[in-house]
Every structure is written in structure tokens, then in C-alpha cells.
Image (cartoon, coloured by chain):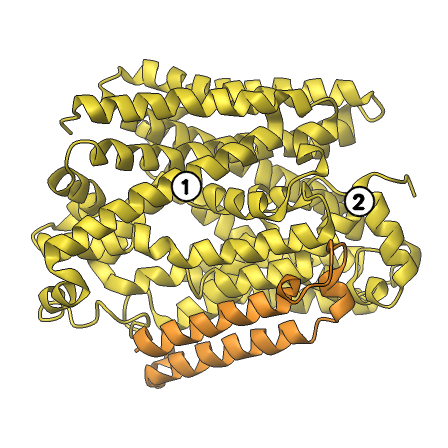
Chain colours: A orange, B yellow
Amino acid sequence: MSNWFRNLPLFWALLIAVAGFLGMLIWAWFRPKAYIYQDAPDQRWWRDLRIWASLLMLIQIALYVVFGT
Amino acid sequence: MDIRGIDLFIVVAYLVAIPIFGVYFKRYVHTEQDYFLAGKMLPWWVISMSIIGTNIGAYDYMGAAGGAYRFGLAQANYEWIGAIPAMILSALLFVPYYWKAGVYTVPEFLGKRYNTAVRVIEAILWGSFLACVLGVFFWASGLMLNEYLGLPIEIALIATALIVGIYTITGGLAAVAMTDVVQLLVMFIGGIALTILGLWAVGGWEGMVQKIIPSHPDHFKLFLPLDNPTYPWAGMIFGLAIVLSPAWWCCHQAIIQRTLGARGEWDAKAGMLFAAFPKMFIPMLVVLPGLLTLALNPNLVGADMDKAFPWLIKNLLPAGLAGLVFAAFMAALISSVDSTLNSAATLWTRDIYQRFLVKKASDKHYLNVGRILTFAFLIWAIIFAPVTKKFPGIYVAMQTLLSIFQGPTFAITLLGIYWKRATQWGGLAGLIGGVCISTTLFLFEKWSFLYVAWWSFCGSIVINIIISLITRPEPTDKLQGLVYGLVMKDKTLQEILSKRAKGETNE
């Protein structure tokens, strides 16, 4: 595996990481609303855990774009 | 370190206050569930802070600062790409199913999903790992108390056992989680104070960058080239982010146990997810000090690089703040020790004692067994701690052993939750086959543990799928509440499981 990757430029690391973060963000939004709010005391927007996950992923993308390579 | 009066006062006050605060929660412990799962009453914010308190140990301060001194910002990958996506995965996929299953441990869940053999293998692995790690943590704590307060090492070990044992034995998970909240606050206050003073001393962020970049041009890059022996980017992404990190955040008993004590499914998920926010700031506490030390003193070489954090404390902090940072250091250690102690007792009580030795005893009986085992692990840790001095590689060996199991464990847990066709024999073969692959790669190919984790994970997935497809499917009744699709499509079942997890029904 190492040999195959050795030919890839470092920029690929950033691309794969950002694609992974975006993939995780999209995956979170595919969780049904009822599943996300299960057992929640109410259905206020800030209890939507998909928003929390999106925020986390957007911060990660920003950090890796700035410091990645 | 020359500790001054005000510092001594802060440290002693902290060490006395923590057990007093923890013992307060004894009043809520009447049953086994109260003891091991905090009576299923933990709110999301306590869970999240306890998770981070458990996750960050004194070794992180020392090791991460040393790693940052050597390799720069790449060390932060362990807190960012090596944690945050996995925490989201854990919160939105794994935690709700553990919680709904009404289990106390991750091996117990795997036992329900697959079979007893898988449960026993996982329980013995995690139980042994946590017991050995306790000894290492105790020795580290003893050394710190010895070095900073001048206590003889034997007295320091007993003092650690007293501080942690008093509230862990009496108050169980509730006491552990609530003290973790306080300890995390102390960690953040001490760590931020150190970072601010350090940045002030080097002329701010720009000043630090200008001092480091000329001699270490890659120190502010998160991804390092493939020829870097420690942090090659492919290993970071495929080994750490895709396998080791999810294995840690989705399958580690001490981490998951907090979410199992949640007062509801939403709190369990939110607790894990919210923990990712403070986790993002951890590099400020453990990575930045390493870079600050490099900017202030680039002359540390070899093993001395691991002393980057103590160097900064010793040379930068005024009276009062040194005590605060030392208290933060102790908080990191104690919050990991109490969680490990509580989780080790939970595993051995539920998965070994209750499963094989005494199956149908009263609730009070298992509560007492839990307390006795917690006490026994304390004694074990005091006795075992000095052994770690004679074998300095023991912690590394334990971590290596864990990484051999982590890829296969994550593989069978992931398939178990996401693929209803995975059978008990597929799970068992996937676990054993994956461990054989990782052991072979370790012993004969001498690969980095990051690559070993990736290939053992892939191998375990393939073996699980093949064996599952050629063996008889599991009956649907057995899988109810354990597999993603089956629960999602059935609202009535969701409600039944939710009530069962809360202890409102025995269905």
C-alpha cells in the first residue's frame, strides 16, 4: 500500500480528508429526523444533532484547508 | 520543580476537594444500575465533559507536547481527524443501539448480536487491558506526587488510591462522571493559562511561527509526507481516521459507558456529539505547549523532547499558576484513573462474574460485587504500578496489543449494527481472522500499527461477510433492536426498546 501511495502528491491527502468530512456531513443529514430527535425533550432546532455534526465538520474542513499541506 | 506555598495550597485543596465532592453522590446509589450506569440519569452535558475527562490523560500532556516538539502540528491529527468524525459516527450510529439494547458493556452488546464466544473474547481483552492500564496510570500519578510534593513513592501510590477510591467505590459512575466535569474545568483553566502565557512570551502566534519555521518548515502542516516514519499521511487517514479512531470512540468501554448512563437516547447521542466541541480545543492544551517550548528552547534533543511540557511549566509559570497547572495535570490523570477503575469493575462484574460465576443473584449482591471488585482493582493497581517501572515498555506493549484487536473489533461491531445478514459465526470468524492478520503483519512484516489496523479491519470485514453468507441467517427476533434497519422501520419497536433501556419494562 505504501508504494502505491508514494507516487501521490501531498495535496491528495487534503482532498481525501475534505471529501471524508463532506461525506460524513452528508451522511449525518441522511439520518431521519425522528431518529435524531428520539427521546429529546422537545423538537427545537438547536436539538437537531445533524446541525451539530455539520458545524463540527465545517470547522474541521476549515482547519485542514488552512493547515493541511 | 520548586513548588511554592500558594502552589502547594492550590494542589492540596484540589486533591482534598475532589473526593469530598465525589462522595456526595453515594446517596444516589442503591442498585447495580445506579452504580454502573449512574441510575441512567446522566444529562448530555455531564456525559460530554466526562468523556473528554476520561479521554485526556497525563500521558496526553507529556506525549502530545513531545510529539508536537518533534513533528509539529501533525500531532493534532489525533485530536481532529483522528477523533471528530469518529465521534459523529459513534453518536449517530453506535451509541443509540448500545443504549437501546439496555446493556452495561460493549462486549455484552456483541454477545447479544453475535454469541457468547465473541463476548468472552472481547471482555477478557478489554478487562485485561483496563487492569494493566490502571497500573501504568497509578505509577504516573505516584511519580507526579513524588516529584512535585516530595511524597515517598509508596505513600504517593496509597494517596492516589485513597483520593480516587473513596468516591469511585462509594458513588460509582455518577461520582466518576460528576468529578470528571470539575476536573475537565480545572484542566481547561490550567491549560489555557499556560498557553496564553506561552504565546505572550514568544510574541503571539506570529512570533511563534517566525521562530519555528526557519528550522522546521513542516511544523505547521497537518499532513506529512509518506516517508515520515511516525505520521505518514496515508497512515493518518486510512489507519487512524478510518479504523483506529472509530474503534476507540465507538467500542472503548470507558468511553461508551458514560453514554449508557444517559437519561434518554437523545442525551446519549448529544453527550457523545457535544464532546467533540471541547475535543477540538484539546490541541491548544496539549499540542501548542510543545510548539511553544520549541520556540522558546529549540535545544531539547532525544528523550528530553518528551519533557517539553514540564520545561514550559518550570520556566514560564509564576507562583500560583504553577500550582493550577499541576492541578490540571493531576485532574487529567485522576479523571482517567477513576473511569478506568469503574469500567474495569463493570466489565468483570457483568461479563465474567454475572455471566459465568453467579448468574441469578439479587441486585444488592451485584452492587456489592461491583464495589468489592473496584476495591480489588485499587489494590491490584498499587501492587502492579511499581512493575511498570521495571518494564518501561509495558504501556507501549499494551497499546500495541490493543491496536491488534481494534481493527477486527470495529469491523465486527460495524457490520453487526449495519448488516442484518452478519451471523454469529461470521462475527466470530471475523474477530479471530482479523486478529490473526494483524498479528502476522506485526510479527513478520514489521508494519506500522497504522497500516496493520487498516488491513486487519479490511480482512475482518471480508471474512465476516464470506462466513456470514455461507452460514444460516440469524432469526429476526434475535436481531430486534440491535441492527439499524430493523429498528428504524418499526416505530412501535423503537418505543418498546426505549422503555426497556430506561428500565420501565422488562420486555
The quadrant in which residue B137 appears is top left
Alpha carbons under labels 1 and 2: distance apart = 31 Å
Residue B196: percent from the left, percent from the top? 22, 52
Q: Are marks 1 and 2 on the same chain?
A: yes
* Sequence-earlier tag: 1 or 2: 1
Mark 1 sits on what residue?
B185
Of B327 and B63, the residue lying toward us: B327
- Secondary structure at badge 1 equals helix
Residue type at numbered disc 2: Ala
Quarter containing the N terminus of chain B: top left
Tell me how many marks there are: 2
- Secondary structure at badge 2 equals helix
Q: Work out whether A65 lies above or below B87.
A: below
Of B104 and B422, the residue lying toward us: B104
Q: Work out whether B383 lies above or below B291.
A: above
Instruction: State the residue at coordinates (48%, 41%).
Output: B54
Q: Residues within 10 Å of mark 2 (few under 14, many from 20)?
A: many
* Label 1–label 2 contact, CB within 8 A: no
Disc 1 sits on a residue from what chain?
B
Mark 2 sits on what residue?
B501
Disc 2 sits on a residue from what chain?
B
Instruction: State the residue at coordinates (76%, 24%).
Output: B357
Instruction: State the residue at coordinates (65%, 75%).
Output: A29
Residue type at numbered disc 1: Leu
Residue A37: percent from the left, percent from the top? 73, 62
Residue B134: percent from the left, percent from the top? 46, 31
